[in-house]
């Protein structure tokens, strides 16, 4: 397999939080992330579902160490959003793959997903840009994921 990734970066001790049943309201969504920022919580991967019946779900990651303060901050929105559900999944690892040329190479995501799938790595969340793909996986799968991705790394 041809090497296509120049950098692989690992972030350990990552928590995935999903806020479910948020009414579509840009001001409320902005307020949620503003309150996390004001609590000095750095949010990383963010993913939003398409609206369904006037509601969305938003998932994001943060460091495990920030979980307690994040939950305290987010609980304050339950009064304003009664159906808000806060789902928490800790002890994850984010693997980020980077290469400038990725934007000109169709199929990089497909290749990396196939390698992870063949290694039986469960992917919890994916975020991308033109030159970066990040996968959130179980922390226990980290060594297997890194090994599975070695064939596409330009530098092992």
Image (cartoon, rainbow, N blue to C red):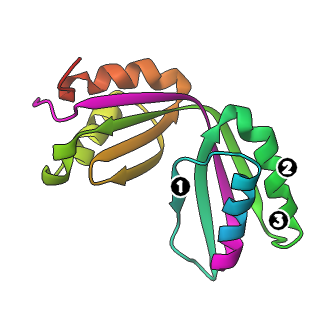
Q: In the shown orientation, is residue 69 left or right of residue 128?
A: right
Task: Name the residue at 62% across, 42% down.
Answer: 62
Q: Identify the mark at residue 46; answer none if there is no mark.
A: 1
**Residues at circles 2 and 1 in contact by the CB criterion of under 8 Å:** no
When asked about the image quadrant of residue 12, the answer is top right
Q: Residue at x 19, y 24 (%)?
A: 151
Q: Which residue is mark 3?
A: 77
Label 2 secondary element? helix
Question: Is residue 39 positioned above or below 2 on the image?
Answer: below
Residue that sits furthest to the left in the current view? 2
Q: Tag 1 or tag 2, which sits nearer the N-term?
A: 1
Residue stretch rendered in magenta on the structure? 1-29
Give the residue drawn at x 18%, y 49%.
107
> Can you give x and y, in whole percent of width and height, for residue 114 in the image?
27, 39
Q: Residues within 10 Å of mark 1 (few under 14, many from 20)?
A: some
Farthest right residue in view? 79
- Callout 1 secondary element: strand
Total labels drawn: 3
CA separation in Å, label 2 and label 1: 19 Å
In the picture, the quarter occupied by the C terminus is top left
- Using the numbered discs, state the Cα–Cα distance from disc 2 to disc 3 in whole angstroms: 10 Å
- In this rendering, the answer to whether 52 lies above or below 132 is below
Marks 3 and 1, how far apart at CA? 18 Å
Nearer to the camera, 90 or 132: 132
In the shown orientation, is residue 37 left or right of residue 102? Answer: right
């Amino acid at each position: 397999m041809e090497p296509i990734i120049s950098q692989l970066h690992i972030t350990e001790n990552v928590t995935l939080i999903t806020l479910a049943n948020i009414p579509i309201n840009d001001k409320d969504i902005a307020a949620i992330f503003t309150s996390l920022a004001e609590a000095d919580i750095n949010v990383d991967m963010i993913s939003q579902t398409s609206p369904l019946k006037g509601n969305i779900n938003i998932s994001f990651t943060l460091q495990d160490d920030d979980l307690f303060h994040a939950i305290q901050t987010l609980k304050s929105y339950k009064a304003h959003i009664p159906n808000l559900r806060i789902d928490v999944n800790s002890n994850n690892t984010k693997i980020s793959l980077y290469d400038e040329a990725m934007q000109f190479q169709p199929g990089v995501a497909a290749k990396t997903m196939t390698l992870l799938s063949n290694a039986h790595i469960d992917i919890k969340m994916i975020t991308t840009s033109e030159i970066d793909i990040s996968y959130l996986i179980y922390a226990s799968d980290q060594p297997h994921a890194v090994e599975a991705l070695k064939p596409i790394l330009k530098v092992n």
